[in-house]
Amino acid sequence: MSDHPMEPLRSVMRDAFRAQQALAIEEEAAEAKAAGVTVADLRKRREDEKRAQEAEAERERVIGDRLRALASLPLTAADCEAIARGQHVDTRPVSHVQRWLADESAPAFLVLLGGVGTGKTYATGLAALEHGGTRGYLKGRSVEFCRAADLGKRADPWRADLEAGVRPLNLDASLLILDDLGAERDADARFHEGLFRLVDARLDRRTIITANLAKADIRARYGERIADRLNHVGRAVEIGGKSLRRQGAGL
Ligand SMILES: Nc1ncnc2c1ncn2[C@@H]1O[C@H](COP(=O)(O)OP(=O)(O)OP(=O)(O)O)[C@@H](O)[C@H]1O
Ligand SMILES: [Mg+2]
């Protein structure tokens, strides 16, 4: 036996540790017996439970990332939750967006035209996630979302806009979504200039435009230069059908 001055204390601690281990082994054996399984099976069951809990925690972490990525889109919390969990319905806008994203040689612009509530904005949420999220959580991918009503000031913010918290539009994002074209109230020179700059800057980059307009309205409202470019590098699809929104209030 060592004559180190701490030896008596160490010895007491060693004994206590061994006693604790023996107790844990006894408890484990008793638990296995009560459950009618071997100790090895009990340990495997616990390992499996731990792994399942870890996998669940990882799934929830990914859902959290996705919800944050969808936070800037004009969708309800329930819609975001459904999109983040992959519980969406495969509507026409969804299948157009998915086909367009999956096709490497697809035209740069996808223009979704259709009536209110037909699922256009919802489908752009899905695109934002599949492309990499608005916070760029997939390396090298970034998604910029802009409501058409904000386009003028975001494309060319004045000092007062910046002071009011307007975020300048990132025309370099790898996916840009311009939502609800046509909903801008006063399409002033700043708006038209912003739209032209957006289209012209993104002739080679993925861009989705949604609008409540018909194909012919695009040329009539935004002019030849924009319509001609969109024809050259875009695909426009008209989404028919009724609103998918609940019609609860009967308005
Ligand atoms: N793919 C989908 N799966 C499940 N629900 C959907 C889907 N698409 C749309 N919805 C439902 O329909 C509602 C309206 O969809 P969304 O906001 O995308 O319409 P919209 O075409 O953008 O309409 P608006 O032109 O008025 O902006 C959503 O809030 C959601 O409840
Ligand atoms: Mg919309």
Image: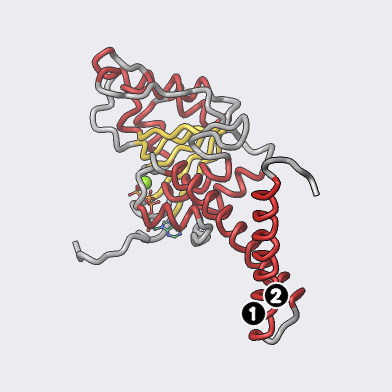
| Residue identifier under label 2 | 42
Instruction: Work out which residue is located at the far right of the displayed protein and give it.
Output: 1
Q: For mark 1, does the 10 Å Cα neighbourhood hold few (<14), some (14 to 19), or many (20 or more) residues? A: some
Which residue is painted at 46% across and 49% down in the image?
238
Q: For mark 2, does the 10 Å Cα neighbourhood hold few (<14), some (14 to 19), or many (20 or more) residues? A: some
Q: Is residue 23 above or below residue 219?
A: below
Which residue is painted at 24% across and 66% down in the image?
248
- At which x and y percent is residue 225? 46, 22
Which disc number belongs to residue 91? Answer: none
226 or 82: nearer the viewer: 82
Which residue is painted at 34% across and 31% down in the image?
221
The answer to whether 75 appears left or right of 37 in the picture is left
Name the amino acid, label 1. Answer: Glu
* Of pointers 2 and 1, the one earlier in the residue sequence: 1
**Distance from Cα at disc 2 to Cα at disc 1:** 8 Å
- At which x and y percent is residue 66? 50, 46
The answer to whether 72 appears left or right of 172 in the picture is left
14 or 48: nearer the viewer: 14
The answer to whether the residue labelled 2 contacts the one labelled 1, judged by CB atoms less than 8 Å apart, is yes
Name the amino acid, label 2. Answer: Leu
Which disc number belongs to residue 31? Answer: 1
Which residue is painted at 67% across and 74% down in the image?
28
- At which x and y percent is residue 7? 70, 46
Q: Does the residue tagged 1 have its C-beta within 8 Å of any atom of ligand 1?
A: no
The answer to whether 158 appears left or right of 63 in the picture is left
Q: Secondary structure at mark 2?
A: helix
Q: Secondary structure at mark 1?
A: helix
Query: Which of pointers 2 and 1 indicates the residue nearer the eye?
Result: 1
49 or 239: nearer the viewer: 49
- At which x and y percent is residue 97? 55, 47
Q: In the image, ligand 1 is in what quadrant?
A: bottom left
